[in-house]
Image: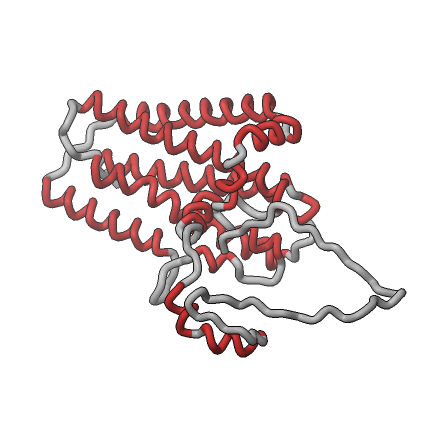
Amino acid sequence: MKLPKRIIISLYMLLVLTSALTFFRLIFATAFYNETVNLSSEYFFKSILLGVRFDLRLSVLMVLPYIFLSWIPIFNAQIREKFWILYWLIIGSFTIVCYSIDLGYYAYVDTRLDASIIGLMKSFSISMKMVWESYPIIPGLIIILSLIWAYFLLIKKVYAKLDKKSYSFPLIKSGAIHFFIVISFLAIGYGKFSGYPLRWSDAFYSTNHFANQLSINPILYFFNTYSFSSIGYDLDSVNQYYNTVADYIGVTEKNIEKLSFNRNIAVASGMPNNANIIIIILETFPNYK
């Protein structure tokens, strides 16, 4: 079936990007093989299939700008084509780099790439020194550059294959095809047959930590958690429920103006000889969830 060149490129790139994201998901499962083998087959396949739905959403978000903007005749056809090849290369390189960071991040804090990394990057020199001392940076860079080069060759192959053919459609027919494809892509990006779309919280479908982590798309997860990173407490709600909370925890000297929850707790005289003292230290545990 013949389709407009723009639509064929969109379909090809949707397939390429989704395949690449699924490939990285399998790489993640392989890299943490000891945790993968402990999953039941039900958890494993459910996480992979759920992850593919997230991957499809991200791929759609990457392809839609091309569908909506590539028809604008700002430049001639040759320059426009080079511009969009550069666009595919940039988003592909960004994806490869993010997934590479995600592997190291999970190995360090046992969670997929999220907004917590911003806190770690505040001490940039210390973080970079730790990364250099803990991970194989040089081999990693070689692998990343090799993957980017292979991806670039694949893009050129897609365009070279389509340049050999000529596609011309009447305006109404072309518009109808574009409308159908856009609606289809939006439905794929929506991700669910329900009243609300696929959400990052859907990845946390079980009590098994690794099953949940395997289903996450780290790029979407980063931006979703970043949107919550600046949310603090609701001062109006604290004022509203101050007396209730203060009574509950035993505040005797209330101060609603300063919202003080200070309590004076008398220390027991003496300590038993058989006291069991436990010290718990939590390091690097900021998660925006």
* Left or right of 208, for residue 90: left
Residue under the point 49% across and 52% down: 288
Residue 232, placed above or below residue 178: below
Give the left or right position of residue 67, taking residue 60 as reference. left
Residue 235 image offset from top left, x and y in percent? 40, 64
In the figure, 246 relative to 234: above or below? below
Residue placed at 52% from the left, 39% from the top?
A: 24
The residue located at (45%, 43%) in the rendering is: 219
- Find residue 46 and report its image quarter: bottom right
In the rendering, at what x and y percent does residue 14 appear? Answer: 36, 40
Q: Residue 131: which quarter of the image? A: top right
Residue at the far right in the pictured view: 273
Q: Is residue 164 visible?
A: no
Of 28 and 171, nearer the camera is: 28
The N terminus, quarter of image: top left
Q: How is the image coloured?
A: secondary structure
Give x and y (percent) for residue 104: 59, 37
Task: From the top left corner, tell me how far across and down residue 214 is, in percent.
Answer: 56, 50
Going by the image, does 49 lie left or right of 195? right
Q: Is residue 251 above or below residue 75?
A: below
Q: Quadrant of residue 212?
A: bottom right
Query: At x 43% / y 27%, what residue is drawn?
Result: 151
Q: Nearer the viewer, residue 73 or 275?
A: 275
Q: Is residue 12 visible?
A: yes
Image position of 152 (left or right of 270): left
- Number of numbered labels in the structure image: 0
